Image (cartoon, grey):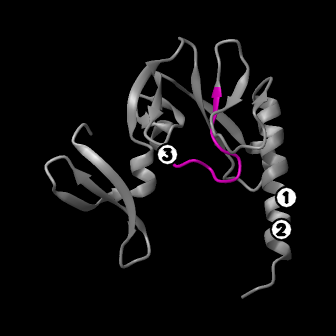
Amino acid sequence: MHQIVSASAVENRHGVEMLKLRQADGTTNTGLMTWEGFGQRPVQLIPSEPGTSFLHVFTGDDDPAEWSVEAVPLIGWALCIDGEVRPVTASGINDSVSEPNDIGNFVAMPNGKIVSCSSWASCAWFDNTEELLSYVREVRSNEAVTSAEEPAA
């Protein structure tokens, strides 16, 4: 990281934005990782308070009453190259899973409050996991209605 002079996005032959790095020695590397993946590289790690957890919302069953939330202990926070702060578990940033585009990621704080760790999320916090699940049911049921209304291709 300390050798990087500049970074830019270039599109590969599949239309994916890849990383182009120019290093201090004058060499250029292209295609090592995606531009998005580069932005999520941590530059600083900050320990989390004991009792903080990353939350997974499981909604695979057709019955929303069966949806659940699972907590994974948080070990810290990563300040990333793109300026975002992301949660870190023993499995990595965001527990090594992709961020749900519809609801974002959430963390349970030691005081029990649920907070969003997605800068773009429409809801910033909840008092408990029941409120979080209610929000997810609303968002995902609206998505189901919207996709059902879209004409078939």
Residue placed furthest toward the left = 25
Identify the residue at horizontal 26%, vertical 45% (top origin).
4
Residue segment shown in magenta: 98-107
Residue placed furthest toward the bottom = 153
* Amino acid at pointer 1: Asn
| Residue pointed to by mark 3 | 97
| Residue pointed to by mark 1 | 142
Q: Nearer the viewer, residue 32 or 82?
A: 82
Coordinates of residue 98 in the picture (x, y in percent):
52, 49
The dot on residue 72 is none
Q: Nearer the viewer, residue 87 or 96?
A: 87
Q: Is residue 22 above or below residue 105?
A: below
Q: Report if the CB atoms under discs 3 and 1 are less than 8 Å apart.
A: no
| Residue pointed to by mark 2 | 146
Coordinates of residue 148 in the picture (x, y in percent):
82, 73
Pointer 2: residues within 10 angstroms few (<14), some, or many (20+)? few
Pointer 1: residues within 10 angstroms few (<14), some, or many (20+)? few
Pointer 3: residues within 10 angstroms few (<14), some, or many (20+)? few
Q: CA distance from mark 3 to mark 1?
A: 24 Å
Identify the residue at horizontal 65%, vertical 40% (top origin).
119
* Amino acid at pointer 2: Thr
What secondary structure prevails in the magenta region?
loop
